[in-house]
Amino acid sequence: MKTKLTVFFEEPFFVGVFEKTDGKRLSVCKVTFGAEPTDAEIYAFILRYYNRLKFTKPVKASIKQKADNPKRRSRMARKQLESKGVGTKSQQALKKQYEEIKTERKIKSREKKEAEKQRLFELKQQKKKDKHRGH
């Protein structure tokens, strides 16, 4: 299992994206840091909160073969440092997690609204009964 952290600036905060790959499965977690974090702050964050991070459900990801050529490795490392943001698979996993949370929130909101509506209806029915009780 490999874990990779990418920190980048996403207006107006610095954001960190943890990518955890296990074989051909990829799961992602997004963390908002606020002001630009130092290396020491990131290390402390990892030590303190890594176990509490909520990663997305694993998605299938194609893992590219490693390059044995040292020039190619340095070229790829330079390319990764220059690139901004996170990989497409990570973005898709984050988007999927966001959509799942959104649907769960909608379901809970709908249930809460229906429960409140039912409570008000029962209250109204009870008031009707109370009015006619004396006759």
Image: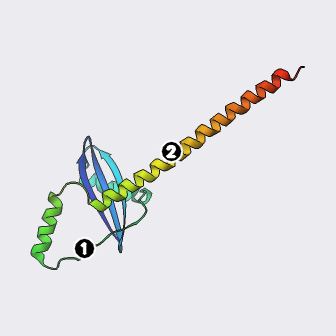
Q: How is the image coloured?
A: rainbow
Name, please, the residue furthest toward the left.
71
Image quadrant where residue 126 sits? top right
Image quadrant where residue 78 sits? bottom left
- Specify the quadrant that holds the N terminus: bottom left
Query: Which residue is located at x 68 percent, y 31 percent?
Result: 120
Name, please, the residue furthest toward the bottom.
68
Query: Which residue is located at x 44 percent, y 56 percent?
Result: 52
7, 87: nearer the viewer? 87
Sequence-wise first label, 1 or 2: 1
Separation of disc 1 and disc 2 at Cα? 38 Å
Residue 28 is left or right of residue 12, and the answer is right
* Rendered location of residue 69, percent (x, y): 12, 78
Q: Element at badge 2?
A: helix
Residue 81 is left or right of residue 100, and the answer is left
What residue is disc 1 on? 64
- Specify the quadrant that holds the C terminus: top right
Disc 2 packing (10 Å; few <14; some 14–19; many ≥20): few
* Rendered location of residue 131, percent (x, y): 82, 21
Disc 1 packing (10 Å; few <14; some 14–19; many ≥20): few
Q: How many marks?
A: 2
Query: Which residue is located at x 59 percent, y 43 percent?
Result: 111
What residue is disc 2 on? 106
Q: Nearer the viewer, mark 1 or mark 2?
A: 2
Mark 1–mark 2 contact, CB under 8 Å?
no
* Rendered location of residue 80, percent (x, y): 18, 62
What amino acid type should be assigned to the residue bearing mark 1?
A: Lys
Q: Element at badge 1?
A: loop
Image quadrant where residue 108 sits? top right
What amino acid type should be assigned to the residue bearing mark 2?
A: Lys
Query: Which residue is located at x 43 percent, y 62 percent?
Result: 57
